[in-house]
Image (cartoon, coloured by chain):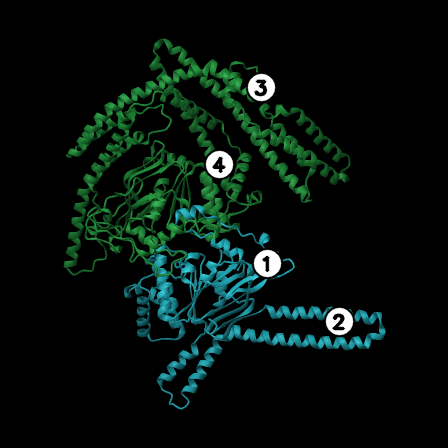
Chain colours: A cyan, B green
Amino acid sequence: MENREVLLKVENLCQYFRMGRHVNKAVDNVSFEIYRGEVFGLVGESGCGKTTTGRSIIKLYDITSGDVYFKGRRICAGIQSYKNAISLARKDAREKIQNLNNDSKLNPENKSANDEKIKEIKSQLNEIVKNNKTLIDLCKVDQKYCDKLYAKDLVKELEEEYKNKPKDAEYYKSLKIAKKARLVTQIQMIFQDPIASLNPRMTVQEIIAEGLIIKGITDKKYIQEKVYEILELVGLVKEHATRYPHEFSGGQKQRIGIARAIIMQPDMIIADEPVSALDVSIQAQVINLLNELREKLGLTILFIAHDLSVVKYFSDRIGVMYYGKLVELASSDELFAHPIHPYTRSLLSAIPLPDPVYEKKRVRMVYNPIAEHDYRYDKPTFREIRPNHFVYCNDVEEAKYKEQF
Amino acid sequence: MADNILEVKKLKISFRTNNGTVKAIRDISFDLKRGETLAIVGESGSGKSVTSKAILGISAGNAIIDSGEILYDGKDLLKLSEEEMQKIRGDKISMIFQDPLSSLNPIVKIGPQIIEALILKNKVSRKVARKEFNQKLEVLKQNMNASFGEEQKEKISKLIKDYNNFSIKSLELENNYNHSHATTLEVISKLENYLFLVSKEQKVNLNEDIKSFIGKLKDVTNGYLINKYIDEYSLIKNDLNNLLVEYKQDKTKEHQVVLKSVDVLTNLKSLLTRMISDEKPDFFSLGFYLYLNPDADFSANYDASTKEMLTEYLNKNFLDEFLVYVEKAIINSNKKSVELKKQVLDELKQLKAYFKAGNLVKSEALANVSKVGDLVTQSIDQLEVIKDSLAYTFKSSMIANTKSYFFSQKSNVKEQVRFEKQTAKYDELIAKGKKVDWKVVPMKIVDLDDLIENIVSKIERLEANYLSKIEDKDIDFAKKASLDLIEYFKAKASEVVYKVTKPMAKEQAIKLMEEVGISEPRLRYKQYPFEFSGGMRQRIVIAIALASNPDILICDEPTTALDVTIQSQILELINKLKKERNLSVIFITHDLGVVANMADRIAVMYAGKIVEYGLSEEVFYSPAHPYTWALLSSMPDLETTEKLDAIPGTPPNMIYPPVGDAFAARNKYAMKIDFEAQPPLFKITDTHYAATWLLHPDAPKVEMPKIIKDRIERMKQGGDSQDGK
């Protein structure tokens, strides 16, 4: 597993929302990696920040702090942590200087030595502030211009290629595409509600082709062929292209949503509860379709859902979220065989199964974080309890969990 | 055996649309037993929700009910007027909808929304109960007169009058008692609030609060609550007054007085709790005694021995004699109705033959039907406590059906003419090479044979019902029935006196909110719906649905919009409430995993028909219909690794429903006959039926798909080891 290519890397992602004076920590210090070609499931109850994580990755929100790397490039960067570092350093320095000043007032003989120290502290502080400010500037550049930087690099590559060749029509065509290339469009999203995510005033063709047009492709014939191809790929037919979204059933609408995402030839898809709003039989159709596409196109999928049996069936690795924090991360078989965190266990105990005898015996475990954990003195962190099985816990709990296995 | 609380018979519903009529429900029948959960499972568009909406009488405007009946408590819900339906909807039958937000009023606080149902229902049910009480008593009197003859007439009318009068006396007593009881409860909850505030060192309004306690306690004048503890009570009252005096003398000492008041009020609380936990007096016997001896007073020393004495007094002086008369009346009424039923059976046979013969004439048919209908109505035993829905609705539904038969006879011809004309015009325009921007509206022909069959089957059902009733009953059935009747009168009487006031309703609402698992109901009571999360909102909707204490609860996908943990909480809640209140639940969902937890019986619907029904174990462990297989195999469980068996294609267009099995086109196992004829319901066990040709003796043996087979194997083995996790 170690030598697989990391496609997406999320580091200390924080997404806070300000609601008046109160700050809502929707996602708090979440880190994970997604390898190329795998399906990464994110589960948790509603309001725990799964969707916010997905949306932050695709830059629908400006993240508060942390970094997101896609194909080795930083696409999102938050500045709050550096700001905090600066203010912390300032506060620290101010206190130290005040202490030294007081000392000089009481003992005038120390004054010269103290002044020296104060100077040193001030220079240290300046150093820290400067470093952090450069980091902040870098973040701002990455956050704002990552796409343009990517396009610039592409253009550079293209020019390198044509250095010794004459510049023909092909060159100008690819130059135009390269100039408009966007890194973030290689991550596409499928939304939960197929009805709300399709514009009712556009035909299916317009909806699906919109991305291509924005990308800078003007060849109408090419676009049409591409749309037909994609429609066939997701199990619809050519005739559907001229219809409007309201003429389709729920499952078909979701297929249009998927078509719109994959026409951009993305490397990664963020599927935000794509089957929650659908019937059982259509659910199966959509999951099978996603599975097929994954094999055909080599997609990597971040699969956000709350239906654990679907996630188990579909994902290679699963992360469990609870109130903005990632509490457990493991491969799906491992997670279901050995759930460690009490929240995961309570979540697993709530899955309904089509088995009346088992159902009547099933006891739902209640997760009460106040009773379960004592985090007053020892703050928890993300630790590896079993190989490739990470849990959010502190020292005492780590020992306890390790003892269990 | 539990009795059927709701019966749906041969229901057919279609919707009129621009493209023709959509046949949403095609001939379904099921029954709901008291206290059980029936789950209806199927894809969207299979007609699950249409069924439930028809039961509640909230079908869409373009719905046509082609035939069938929904029987509940001696009424056919499909034939009721809107006013009558309103008394049932929300009161006897409640519904929980899929989306909790859209079923709550966004600009009204939670509390008033829960109370509304309570107060509205109470008004109606009191009136209805009074009416039913009087009616039954009148019938009883007539029957007594008939069985004892002229010379006893005076005696009987005196008995009935006595019964009526002392019932009213008991009612008054009970009413007062109930009112005081409720007030006491209110005071207790206020006391709790006060003590809570003091314990948290919050500010309390000492002077006014204590005054309000004293004022409220004046309302608790009912002797049967307070007289036993009158000494203790007056001591506490003195203490309270002293506190007030102390406070007024020196207002700076408020804090100390508040601390003192805690002890006194705790005492008061414990006293009040003891008061209301005392057994409720038997007002029935008490009322009788007080009716004869108006000056007697038991309020200070009412206990078990007094109760015994009063009951004996009642039995000796009135009830024993009365019961003899009641028994005679019941036997008389039963005998009469059995005789009439025997006559009716002959008539029914003739009527059946008449309808089967065909060549009906409208006036003759209607006259026949109304004649027999009248006879059936007469033959009903009016003194039976449990209403026989079939007989009660026979006349009205038969007349409606016959009328619709003759109406369709005419309209079919008209429709044919119209269709031919339009088609001719359309063809002409096309032949001329013009562009036509309109379509020929498809022909809507009602199947007359079907209607006749419907009528005949109704007669047959009534026949079977009557035949079973004519059989000789036990010797002491009259004794049982008379006791039942007295209980019925008592229940009705207590319904009459049960008056809900606003503060009472508030207390009840808060209790309900606690029951459905909303924490801090007193705070939540004053919040708006948007302040709640999805799960909490659904709980409030459940509280509203339960407020009027319904018999039947219809849950239309109540957990589809919620996530896993909340979903299982809500399901547990519904299960718990069902057990506590002996509710009958119709649970509609497309998620079979949810159903396994809830249902006693399952009906699988597809394209407007029930394709399989049986006990939940039977449907899950030995499913028989290919559609059930498909549903089961299209959902992954925790062990699934292979490709899911999605059901290919979409449900059929119900404007032109398929001739044969509706599922045939999507069915891997379809045979030739599946496309030609509809399969009947084949019986697998006594409780398990499935409509598929695969069960026909001549059909080839087909195994269910491997994925389900494996799963069932696994379930059977792992049933013990899987629990907990």
Q: Measure the alpha-carbon separation of dots 3 and 1.
A: 64 Å
Residue A97's disc is 2
Q: Chain of mark 3?
A: B
Question: Does label 1 or label 2 sit earlier along the sequence?
Answer: 1
**In contact (CB < 8 Å): disc 3 and disc 2:** no
Rendering coords of residue B478 (x, y %): 36, 20
- Please tell me which residue lies in front, B348 or A170: B348
Residue B298's disc is 3
Q: Secondary structure at mark 4?
A: helix
Circle 4 residues within 10 Å: few <14, some 14–19, many ≥20: many
- Please tell me which residue lies in front, A88 or B399: A88
Rendering coords of residue B390 (x, y %): 30, 31
Q: Nearer the viewer, mark 4 or mark 3?
A: 3
For badge 2, the amino acid type reads Ile
Write the residue at 38% across / 84% down.
Answer: A171
Q: Circle 4 is placed at which residue position?
A: B118
Q: Measure the alpha-carbon separation of dots 4 and 3.
A: 33 Å
Q: Nearer the viewer, mark 1 or mark 2?
A: 2
Discs 1 and 4 carry the same chain letter? no
Q: Looking at the picture, does residue A149 appear above or below residue B155?
A: below
Q: Nearer the viewer, mark 1 or mark 4?
A: 4
